[in-house]
Image (tube, rainbow, N blue to C red):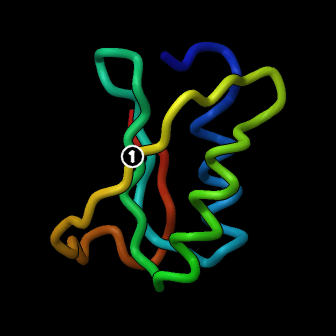
Amino acid sequence: MVQGVGFRYFTQDAAEKLRLSGFVRNLRDGRVEVFAIGTPQQHAELRAVLERGPRMSSVTEVQEEPAALDRQYEGGFFINF
C-alpha cells in the first residue's frame, strides 16, 4: 500500500533520469503499477531504485513481468491518475 510518501513522483523522476518512457499509477488495492519502455539495463536500474523507494517508504516487494509494447507511452514518463 502506498500513501503519502510521493512514490509516483519518485518513480517518475527516476524513470526520467534513466530516459525511460511509460507511466506510473496507483491501483485500487493500494499497490503501484509501473509500465516502463526501455532497455534491460534501464529496467534493472529502475528496479534497484524502486526497491529502495523514497524516504519514509517501506517497499516490501517489486514484481516484474513482460508486457506488450504500447507506443502511446513513448516519448515521456507520465503519472496517471
Residue at disc 1, secondary structure: loop
Which residue is nearer to you in this view: 27 or 74? 27
Most extreme residue toward the right is 55
Q: Position of residue 20 (x, y in %)?
A: 53, 73
Which residue is nearer to you in this view: 40 or 81? 40
Q: Position of residue 56 (x, y in %)?
A: 80, 21
Residue under pointer 1? 63
- Quarter location, residue 44: bottom right
Q: Position of residue 14 (x, y in %)?
A: 69, 59
Q: Is residue 46 placed above or below 56 in the rendered structure?
A: below
**What's the residue at 39%, 41% (across, down)?**
80
Q: Is residue 38 placed above or below 29 in the rendered structure?
A: below
**What's the residue at 21%, 71% (across, down)?**
70
Q: Position of residue 36 (x, y in %)?
A: 42, 65
Image quadrant where one finds the C terminus: top left
**What's the residue at 40%, 74% (across, down)?**
37
Most extreme residue toward the left is 68
14 left or right of 22 in image:
right
**What's the residue at 16%, 71% (across, down)?**
68
Say which amino acid is labelled 1: Gln
55 left or right of 48 in image:
right
43 left or right of 54 in image:
left
Most extreme residue toward the front is 60
